[in-house]
Image (tube, helix red, strand yellow):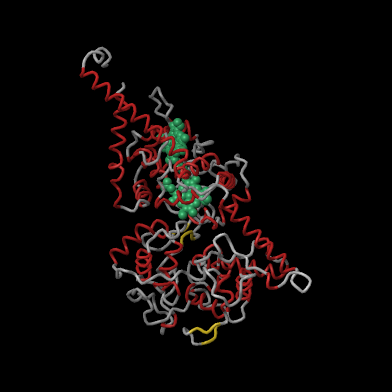
Amino acid sequence: MTQDHHEEEPHGKTVRRWLYAGLGAVVLLAGGTAVVRTGAVPRALGLAQAPGATQEADARKTRVRETFEEDIARLGPDGVELASLSIPTDAKGYFAPPLESEMPDGEDGASIRRGRDIFLNPGANATDYVGNALACANCHLNAGRLANAAPMWAASGVYPKYRSKNDQINTMEDRITGCFTYSMNAQDGPTGGPPPQGDPIYKDVESYIHWLATGAPNRVDLPGAGYPALDEPAMAYDETRAKATFDENCSVCHGSDGQGRQDQNGRYAFPPLWGPHSYNGGAGMSRVSTAAGFIYANMPIGKPYSLTEQEAWDVAGYINAQDRPIDPRKVTDADAPVAPAGPPSASGTGTVVPAN
Amino acid sequence: MIYRPIALVIALVLAPPVLAQDAALPEWRAADDYAAAAANVDPALAMPLINGDPEATDKAWACASCHGDAGQGAETIPRLSGLSVGYIVKQLHDYKTGVRQNNNMQYVARTLTDEQMAALGAYYGALDAPPAATPSLGGDLERGRMLALEGDWNVDLPSCFTCHGPSGWGVGQAFPAIAGQNPSYIHAQLAAWKAGSRANAPLGLMQSVAAALSDDDMRAVSDYLASLPPPQRLPASR
C-alpha cells in the first residue's frame, strides 16, 4: 500500500526501514525457532544426553559383571588369584548388582524370582501381611538396585547387627519383619501382623536381596548405601512454606491430599504418602531426616537432586506432619483409630526411635 | 499485507505475559479442573465440530477429517478416544494459547470456546478406543519393553509406566494413556520434548524423560507401546 509514495518521500523511507527491520526480526525469529526445533542449541551446550550414553553404561555393566562371573568360576591356585578379583562397579562408581542374565536356574532362581515379585508387589504376593498400598520398591527404587535409594546390595552384608531400637541382634529376617510391621503396616493387613518367623516369604525376599549383592564386599559400608544424610536445614519448619513446596512439586503425582493415584483398574501408580494406606508412625520414612534424604536424592521421580536441601526438609516435614496409621508399639487398644503424628521436628526423632 | 509479519512479531513479544497468567495454580491442576468442568457439559455440543457443520461449505477442519470417525488418528495424528477428558481439554487450551505448538491444531483451536473444548473432551474421552496400533518404526521391541516397564537408571530414567500407569492406560487426568497410541505420533512427541519444541508437561516431567532417550530408544519405546492394547473401559467404571 505504500508502493506509490516511498520512493520520493523521506516519510516513506522511514516506513521502509521499519518494514525491513520487521522482516529482519521475522527472519531471525523463524531461524531461531528452526534452530531450537532441531535441538542444535542443547547439543552445542552439551545439555542433551549424547546418544549412546546409556548403551555405553549398559555395556560397561555387562562387561564388569561378565568378567566377575568368569573370574569367580576360575578362582584357585591354578586360575585367578583371589587378590585380583575386583568389585564390579557401574559408570558412576557404585557397586553394580548382577544382571538379569546372571539369575541362577533351578530352585535358587525360583526363590530369587519369587522374592523379587514380593519386593515389587507385596500387596499381591505377600497379601496376608500387608496393611497398606505400598511396595518395597516405592522407597527402594529400581527394584532395590538404585544407589542412594537404600539399595538392597548395600543392606545385604550389614546383618546380623545390633539395633538399639529393639535392643537386640537383628538378623535380616528380623529386619524384614520390621519392614512388614511398620512400612507395610501389617497391623491393618488380613492377619494383623508380619509373616511368622521362618515363613517362606522371608526366605524368598532374602534370596533376592543377597543375590543382588553377589560380589559386593561383606560388612562394608558401601557408597550409595541408604539415603544421603543432609545437613540440618537452615530455616525452621514452616507449614505454609512447606505446603506450597509440596503443592508445587509433589501433588501432581501424589495428589494434593497425598493419597497417591490409581489407574482405572485401581492399581496404584503413585503411592499414598499419609493416611490409612501409607506407612505407619514406626516406619523409617516417618523420621523427617530419613524422608528428607530420600526426597532430596530421588524426588520428583525422574528429576533427582532437583529440589534444594531446604525444600526436601520442608516437604519431608509436611508429609510426616499428617495423620497416618499409629506406630503399633504405641497401640494399647487393638482397635485404636488412626492417630495424628506428633509435630515434625527437623531431626524428627520424637519420642520413639523409628524401627526401619 | 507486509504489516502482517510485524503484527506477528508484536503478538509474539506480547504473548509471554499472557501465558504466564495461570502461574499461581500448580499447572497440573488444569487437567483436573477441566475434567470437572466437562462433566457438566453436553457432549452433543461437540458434534458439529467433530463431523463438520452440514450447512458449512468448508468441512476441512472437522476433527473427524483428521482424527477419524472413531477418533483413532493415523501416523502423526494421535488417537483421541480413550484419553482422559481433562488431558484432552488441557491440550486444546494449550494449542489455543500457543503453549503447545502445531500449525494444524493451533488453527483448529484458535476459535474454540471453553465450552466447546469441554464438550470435545467429554466426547472423545467417552469414546471406546479402537484396537491397538501397529509398530512401524523398526524399533527394538525388547529394549522398548525394558524402557516402558523398568526404565533406564543409568540416565535417571524411571519406567514410562511409573507415571503412565501399570498398563500404560494413564493415571488420573494429568497422565495420559500411551499404550496403543500411533507409534509415529509418540515418536514425534518424544522428539519434540527432547528438542524443546513441546514444553507443556507439568513440572517439565516429560522433558527430563525425553532428554534421556536416544533416537533408537524413542523408536523402540514407541513401537513397543503401539503393540499394547489401548485403554479398555471396564464395565463397572464411570
**Vertical relation: B135 (above or below) A95:** above
Residue A322 in the image: state x and y as whole percent.
35, 70
Q: Is residue B169 visible?
A: no
Q: Residue at x 60, y 42 (%)?
A: B135
Give the camera-side residue of A19 and A129: A19
**Vertical relation: A82 (above or below) A142:** below
Q: Residue at x 59, y 82 (%)?
A: A197
State which quadrant residue B44 falls in. top left
State which quadrant residue A348 falls in. bottom left
Residue A171 in the image: state x and y as whole percent.
57, 81
Give the camera-side residue of A274 and A190: A274
Residue B7 in the image: state x and y as whole percent.
29, 29
Give the camera-side residue of A76 and B178: A76
Q: Residue at x 57, y 68 (%)?
A: A119
Q: Is residue A305 visible?
A: yes
Residue A327 in the image: state x and y as whole percent.
42, 78
State left or right for residue A321 relative to residue A153: left
Q: Quadrant of the N terminus of chain A?
A: top left
Furthest residue toward bottom: A167
Q: Report how many numbered discs are placed on residues in the image.
A: 0
State left or right for residue A329 relative to residue A218: left
Furthest residue toward right: A78
